Image: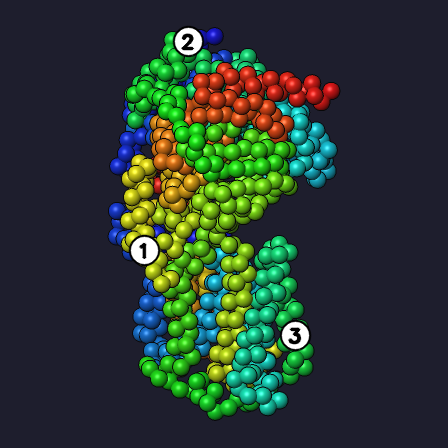
Amino acid sequence: MDTPLLTIEHLSKIFPGQVALDDVDLVVRAGTTHALVGQNGSGKSTLIKILAGYHQPTGEPVATLLGAEFPLGDGRAAEAAGIRFVHQDLGLVDMLSSVENIAMGSGFLTRRGRINWKAETARARDDLAAIGFDDFEVTMPVGMLAPSQRTAVALARALRGWEDGASLLVLDEPTASLPDDDVQRLFDAVRRLKARGVAILYVSHHLDEVFAIADEVTILRDGQRVTTQPIGDVDKSGLIELMIGHKLVTKRSGAFDPAGAPLLRAVNLAGGNVRNISVTVLAGEVVGVAGITGSGREHLVPLITGQIPSIDGDLEINGRDIGPYAPRQMIDSGGAFVTADRARLGNLPMMSVTANTTICDVKRNAKRRRLLHPRERVEAKEWIERLGTKTSAAEAPISTLSGGNQQKVLFARGLRLVPQVIVLDEPTRGIDVGAKEEIHSIIDNAAASGSAVLVASTDTDELVRVSHRVIVLRQGRIAAELVGAEVTSTNIERAQLQSDHNSQDGLR
Amino acid sequence: MTNAELDVDPLALARPQGSWTSRLRFDRYSALYLWGAFVVFFGLTQSAYLSTASISLTFGEKTIVCVLALAFLVPLVTDTFDLSIGANLNLSLVILFKLRSEGVSMWIASFLALAACATAGFISGYVVVKLKVNSFIATLAMSQVVTAMSLLISNNRQITDKMPKSFNNIGTKRPLFNLPMYFYFMLLLAAILWYVFEHTPLGRYMFATGGGREAARLSGVNVDRLTWGSLVVSAMIAGFGGFVFAWKNNIFQNSAGPGFLFPAVAAVFFGASQLKGRANVWGALIAVFALAFGIKGLQLSFGAGTFWIEPLFNGLSLLIAVSLASRQGIIKIRKRKAVTA
């Protein structure tokens, strides 16, 4: 199928003081998945927002959909033309159930004026099953669901009633919070849709996904289209170079002192999906934590940092025993962490970059209980400079920054404590390749200066890049340990899959 | 209610470059403009409006509302509501008068009045922090319990004229600009709170608690203690409001406290749309007086029998001011997102 479904020519968007899109052309063919990649600020979000009608284009771009003229920047026209969106933040109401969230767009089934809950629940269950998610209770508030399940709910909502006149599905970072195995389920759903002859515009930072799912890829850089190619004509490193213009380090180099002091020691930790894990991290060492979702990988860092209560186990930071569920003791003992749930557990959203940076130790910039604002600002600016954080001002609210830059502020929050132990959970989730590489160097530097670092991540390339040693979890326990040269993507993935396989055997 | 952005002028990012109307910043200073407009308009149309007596009466009358607004503001910064402030004012007032009529010394009566309020705040804090009841509900319920206590103590009777001369003097003395002493007490209290909020680590921790409770907790902020403490402080400030009422009116009556709740809460929310665009001390006080001067002028213009003007005016002004500010906020956020997108 080579018929163009959507064509856009000469699309520009100029914001005060910034050209977001500069004469961009885009052709999306029917029955294909078209990936849109680029770093933050490359203009891909702007392009999506123009399609959705949130922004209006500058000038007079020409666009057609299925051969007919299509007005850009008109949300109603997009809806009427059968374009559907799943945005990165999903737009779900946490307090409502999946049934209610899915029905919000389409309206409720009623019988004699009252909602027919039985039919509505069945319909929601069917819709979710159709995209491969039939394994959770649809009447539970979506706030209590796992990230992958939330994504499924948002997708089901976008797809409801889409059969008639369906044309284009836009997925904006749909996997930003999804672990690998759930990404596969999402892909299956996408492939099924594609088979129906619709097109999918797929925006993602995960290049592996782009290679797995896309037929064509368009690369944006600084608001301009670099190129559009069939996915077979380009490889991953080539793609990254097109996006950012230089090569990336992919494997950790440099060793650490094996006689270093054990700075982080967890013994028989249990809680959440973690059954029993003991791990020790030495000074200067980076230990990666891998595992599929449900293996305990997602709960190890929350356990250590007190985000979820622990059932059992001892935790020692820098030789000091710290009780479970005690953020203050952890900080006082020389620990720092960055959470996986940046929006809810990391950011203080309305507060400034400065206040976000200094919150763990505000008193440092106080004298006789008086906060010295200038001194605080100077310190914040130093960190902005040191980590290359892009922000309009140290006093700008953190919510105005991009994800990668917010993450740098949270790193600054931890690093300024000069921590001896750093615990990281998905440190580069939802962050573009450039910022990702910068955060990896921050981790390198922290280890080089003698900190013990624990990194839990679903991104195996990331673990290979930063870790000296990787522990692979399965069913809440350590299933495999990879050291030095053994740390490769293949080994990690194999260990994860084996684990998965074994666990199923174990259940029978 | 989110109300935490520290020492940021969030709009410094997007300074209005455009028209002269946007330069005047109606969104951030609407209360000040309103106040000025009232003074000019009613000053020209009503001869009695700008008399010294009239002005000092208005300032004096609204001091109680200001004190309660400050009481409401303290927990609000940590994103906690305290709807029992009116009841707490009453509790302090009744204890003061009751103990005086039993012949207890002024100092001991004052101490016990404040201690009773602190206890009420402590219980609210326990319910909110330990039993994890939504603060809105917890303090609404507490307000009824406290009201019951007041009724029990007063036996539902008015008590008058039990205060020693030295106490009443605070109500009658006018040390500066013909304004009563207690007005300056209130200003002092406001200045202390402002200092704590804006210039101490404690204030920062409070705003962080209000801005993102879980994030603040994980950053080592003792959010439970701050929430609890802010409810105790709020109750004590409300108790001080009872003193102001006594100084001004020299009477206890059961209806004293609750009537001040709405104007105080309204002033805080109206004030939160002012200046920095988050809950703040001076915004709340400016809001109280801007509304008071408007009401005063209207009452003078329409003559006697216009008591309905006050709640109508309070309600409408709150609606207009807050919607003006949030409209501006929405436009600003859109613009900012567009720039960072």
Callout 3 environment at 10 Å: few (<14), some (14 to 19), or many (20+)?
A: some
- Residue hosting label 2: A232
Q: How far across and how far down the image is residue B315, in percent?
A: 49, 63
* Distance in Å between CA atoms under marks 1 and 2: 55 Å
Split into 4 quadrants, where in the image is the C terminus of chain A? top right
**Is disc 1 surrounded by few (<14), some (14 to 19) or many (20+) residues within 10 Å?**
some
Could you classify mark 2 by the number of other residues whose Cα lies within 10 Å: few (under 14), some (14-19), or many (20 or more)? few
Residue B118 in the image: state x and y as whole percent: 56, 70
Q: What residue type is labelled 2?
A: Gly
Q: In this view, does B109 lie to the left or right of A368?
A: right
Q: Looking at the picture, how far across and down is residue A202, in whole percent?
A: 46, 21
Question: Which is nearer the eye, A417 or B285?
Answer: A417
Reading the image, the residue beneath label 3 is B149
Instruction: Name the outermost residue toward the front.
Output: A259
Q: Is residue B33 above or below residue A279?
A: below
Residue marked by disc 1: A373
Q: Which of B288 and A395 is in front in this view?
A: A395
Image x and y of residue A404, in percent: 39, 34
Q: Residue at x 45, y 36 (%)?
A: A261
Decide: marks 2, 3 in contact (CB < 8 A)?
no
Q: Could you tell me which secondary element the residue under label 1 belongs to?
A: helix
Question: As displayed, is residue A199 above or below residue A128?
Answer: above
Same chain under badges 1 and 2? The reply is yes
Image quadrant in which you'd find residue A347 = top left
Q: In this view, does A159 lie to the left or right of A282?
A: right
Sequence-first tag of 1 and 2 = 2
Quarter of the image where one finds residue A388:
top left
Q: Name the secondary structure under disc 3.
A: helix
Amino acid type of disc 1? His
Which circle, 1 or 3, is nearer the viewer?
1
Eyeballing the image, is B167 above or below B331?
below
